[in-house]
Image (spheres, rainbow, N blue to C red):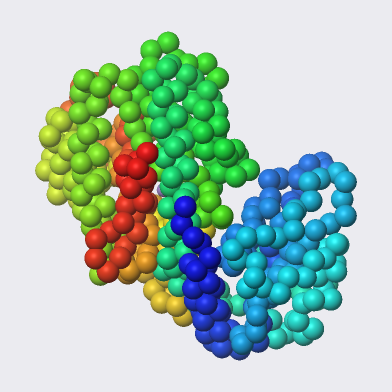
Amino acid sequence: MTDFAPLYAAHLAELQRRTAEALARGGFDHLVVPSGTLHYQFFDDRDYPYAVNPQFKAWVPLTRNPGSWLVATPGQRPKLIYLQPFDYWHAVPQAPGGYWVEHFDVVVIRTAEEALQHLPADPARCAILGEPQSALRDHVPNNPPAVVNYLEYHRAHKTPYEVAMMREASRIGVRAHRAAERAFRAGASEFGIHLAYCQAAGQDANDLPYSNIVCLNEHAAVLHYHDRDRVPPREIRSFLIDAGAAFHGYACDITRTYARDTGSEFQALIDAVDAAQRAMCEQVRAGTDYKRIHLDAHLALAGILKEFGVIKASPEAALATGVSSAFFPHGIGHGIGLQVHDVAGFAASDAGGTIPKPEGHPYLRLTRTLEPGMAVTIEPGLYFIDMLLEEVKKNGHGDSVDWERVDAFKPFGGIRIEDDVVCTEAEPINLTREAFAEA
Ligand code: GLY
Ligand code: MN
Ligand code: MN
């Protein structure tokens, strides 16, 4: 395994550099970041799964520590205020350990309120990044836009440490995807496949970066299908799985689609999307407008639909009339890192501003021009979704579709292939394909 210590040291130095600039822009002396608190269900004493403040896990690979705080002051060692409560009801976090600890002044506290004694005295001098309910007396999160915009904009550029974390997440995800495929081939239900995935990843709902999407047959036409039938369908035709994994707070986001009958026409359609997806991943290069990749994907996917006899219009016409969007109704991807849908996808600069989405493409989540260090997903898909196909008819474009061909593919639901790709000065790094090749 990679030695994370030197990578982390360089990552921390970069965070400190960014923080000094962000604080200068906002006119603050300290960056203060609560890890977050537990949220409780209404009329109940049950807590929701804890989700760490992403601004906190950007500094330290701690994802299960509510009530802790990070304080960064330019020119000083960062301070970690670490809550280790006296509690015999719940497992208490271990003393912090690992390659990152030596860089911090660690103060252990036993109650959440004790943090106040260790936070900078004057909250007016602090940029406090967190949710409102993390407030401790007058240390109330203020989330100054100048500070948040700067940090979030630059978070798109992953440090080598962050790429290493995402590589580990990808290895775990791929291991679990392979187990899921085996479960599918063995005839398991959606729920059974999900359990096989979690078992192989060693992660479940509390750990995974998003809720697994596990679809057999027509369910693959539901973009975010989360139902997971407990019983397998009588006839199993196809399998789409969109599932990730986490490592030290970083995510992978991977989708694969399989045909039960590998000699079938649906398998040929999968293979065509897969080949097109690989070409799209090659477009992840410095200077490329991500919007361009999205629009080119429409042309490539419409070309495949034409080749398979599903549409009759040219790819250009299909894009112009919105017919391609009926089959590919989501964005080509998004930034990824600490969050599966990473922040600042539309940021025009580190001081604010928005780069709009192309007209008619409301679900694109990233409109920036790619630069070295940016990590994105590339996830083209083709689906047979009744609601959207009805729209095509209503909009007067029914003639550009061969409805018999649609009916032939509908029982398979759809196809999505998704990789995580890092933009570099030269060749892109495809973390997902790398991990599959290694497995
Ligand atoms: N897993 C959700 C997505 O691919 O964006
Ligand atoms: Mn994705
Ligand atoms: Mn996904």
- State the residue at coordinates (37%, 64%): 374
Nearer-the-camera pick, 11 or 259: 11
Q: Relative to 299, say whether 411 is above or below.
A: above
Instruction: Give the image quarter of residue 387.
Output: top left
Image x and y of residue 201, in percent: 52, 38
In screen coordinates, is 281 left or right of 37? Answer: left
Q: Relative to 162, say whether 154 is above or below.
A: below
- State the residue at coordinates (30%, 24%): 259
Nearer-the-camera pick, 15 or 123: 15
In screen coordinates, is 134 left or right of 419? Answer: right
Image x and y of residue 141, in percent: 70, 72
Image x and y of residue 423, in percent: 32, 62
In screen coordinates, is 237 left or right of 105? Answer: left
Image x and y of residue 237, in percent: 34, 19
Nearer-the-camera pick, 109 or 37: 109
Q: Which quadrant: the C terminus?
A: top left
- State the residue at coordinates (47%, 43%): 172
